Amino acid sequence: MKRIITILLVTLLSASLSFAQTHIPAGDVSGTWTFAGSPYIIDGEITIPSDSTLSVEPGVIVQFSDHFKLIVYGRLIADGNADSLITFTAEDTLTGWFGLRFFNTNTNGQDASLLSYCILEYGKATGTASSGGAIYLENSDEDFEDVTICNNEALGFGGGIYMINSNPNLTDVSIYNNTAVYDGGGIFCYSSIPTLIRITINHNTTEWYGGGIACFNNSDLDLVNVTISKNIADYGGCGVACLYNSDVTLLNSIIWDNGINEICTVDNGSISATYSDIKDGTGQSYFGEGCIDADPIFVNPAIGDFNLTAYSPCIDAGDPDPIYNDPDGTRNDMGAHHFQQAGLLGTVTFAPGVTGNVEEVEI
């Protein structure tokens, strides 16, 4: 009998923790949002001041009850893990929320914000601040690692991310199903120098340039092991659009099946590619050393699975310099997801932000 009572008490305690919630009114926020207090229901526009830090524990759900912003002048540390993602979402997915908006964090003495193992979904940028559906960066260099940015919308530029005068670092990020009325269905860069490593950008749309990425006005992008596929733009440059004295460098990347065309340059925009797979790229000025034009043979791009099959020509086709070797120790594979080769140790990516161990086998 005593054992039964103990089990019931544990069950009731777990239930109470699962249904705990914390309401956050409009105003300044800082401190720590704990898993025990999750979900955090945001009931007004909130701000992290320039002298403050807000930390969010793994597994926390941040849910906006209406179309409110989280404005960051200070520092946001949302550091989840593969087993406990942090989610920023909207209570009403049709109304959405107003996204994360970072301002002047480069000049106020704050260290960079960090978002790791996070999901940002159902952001909607409207009205006079209509750019950056999920993330808006102005004079802000932040770090994003193992982040998924999906189902966001901007009535201006940058359905997933908008950046101006900002140099963020994006690593192992998945950007999909975002839309912008103007340029940059996935990402829009203006006078910015972001670094993108192992990024998947797919199924984003815009009515103007750059269904995947659009860069304007002296932006300078380095894309390493990036996969850009199935993006749509009505005007052109469905995969990557490079405009107005901007420069894009592609390395070990795949640009494939992006509607009307893969890449476009306008008004002194410049793109160079090496060891990359670019559809219809043969003979183009940007088609450099090691580039190929061959179907990458993804597992199932229709449902967003851009892992390589065993027959992909992108396997062991990246830059042969050992500094780019895959985790299994073999020559770099093109694209965001390396193909785990049998008999070697390492990790294989099953889905954005989720990995599993790979055991050694005989071959």
Image (tube, rainbow, N blue to C red):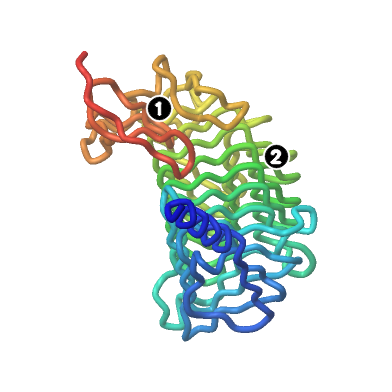
Does residue 101 appear left or right of residue 195 in this picture? right
Picture residue at 58% right of the left edge, 50% below the top: 149
Residue at the location (50% across, 22% down)? Answer: 299
Q: Which mark is residue 291?
A: 1
What is the crowding at mark 2: few (fewer than 14 residues within 10 Å), some, or many (at least 20)? many
User: In terms of depth relative to the viewer, which is nearer, 363 or 223?
Assistant: 363
Q: Position of residue 148 (x, y in %)?
A: 54, 48
Camera-nearest label, 2 or 1: 2
Q: Specify the farthest residue to the bottom.
A: 51
Residue 25 lies, with reference to residue 210, above or below; the image says below
Task: Tell me the quadrant of the picture where the C terminus can be found.
Answer: top left
Residue 328 position in % (x across, y down): 25, 31
- Earlier sequence position, callout 2 versus callout 1: 2
| Secondary structure of residue under mark 2 | strand
Residue 80 numbered tag: none
**Which one is in front, 312 or 57?**
57
Q: Is residue 192 left or right of residue 340?
A: right
Is residue 56 positioned above or below 284 on the image? below
SS for callout 1: loop
**Residue ID for mark 2:** 233
